[in-house]
Amino acid sequence: MKLANQSDSGFITYGQLFKCLHKFDWVGNGSQQKLNKDLGAVVYYCVQNKLPIVTSLIIRQNNNQLTNQAKQNIYDCAKQLGVTNMQANVELYISEQQEKSLNLARCDGALVW
């Protein structure tokens, strides 16, 4: 959340997060696999602790937004982990999670990235 709080938009890129977590630059497929595992753990933590899904604030650098596949992955993962009070529409759910996560970041929330 610290990175999101330091960002003008409140969003961060996959590369920024990866470098913060692993202390070296993104280097292709291996980095993506490692970060996917990290993001799954973050979603799990958020669900278990009744926090917004903060991974909704991680965007692609080249288009400054989540891909449709990333949105669907977040939605499916949260659902599989037992989130029941979900919007039926993926876009609405992600938008809601982004708004809640941005509010958490502005408050310098409980998670530190």
Image (cartoon, grey):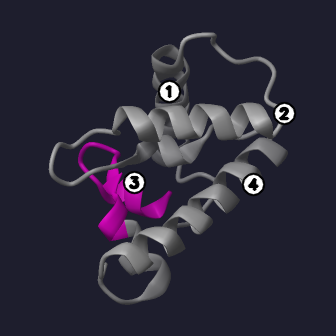
The residue drawn where x is 30% and y is 82% is: 27
Kindly identify the amino acid type of the residue bearing the numbered disc 1. Ile
Q: Secondary structure at mark 2?
A: loop
Q: Is residue 42 left or right of residue 96?
A: right
Give me the C-alpha separation between circle 3 and circle 4: 17 Å
Tell me the tag on residue 94: 1
Q: Secondary structure at mark 1?
A: helix
Q: Which residue is mark 3?
A: 4
Provide the secondary structure element on which disc 3 rests: helix
- Give the residue type that dot 2 points to: Gly
Amino acid identity at mark 4? Tyr
In space, the residues marked 2 and 3 are separated at their CA atoms by 26 Å
Q: Which residues are magenta?
A: 1-16
Give left or right: position of 19 versus 99. left
Residue 97 shown in magenta: no
> Mark 3 touching mark 4, by CB under 8 A?
no
Q: CA distance from mark 1 to mark 3?
A: 16 Å
Residue located beneath label 2 in the image: 82
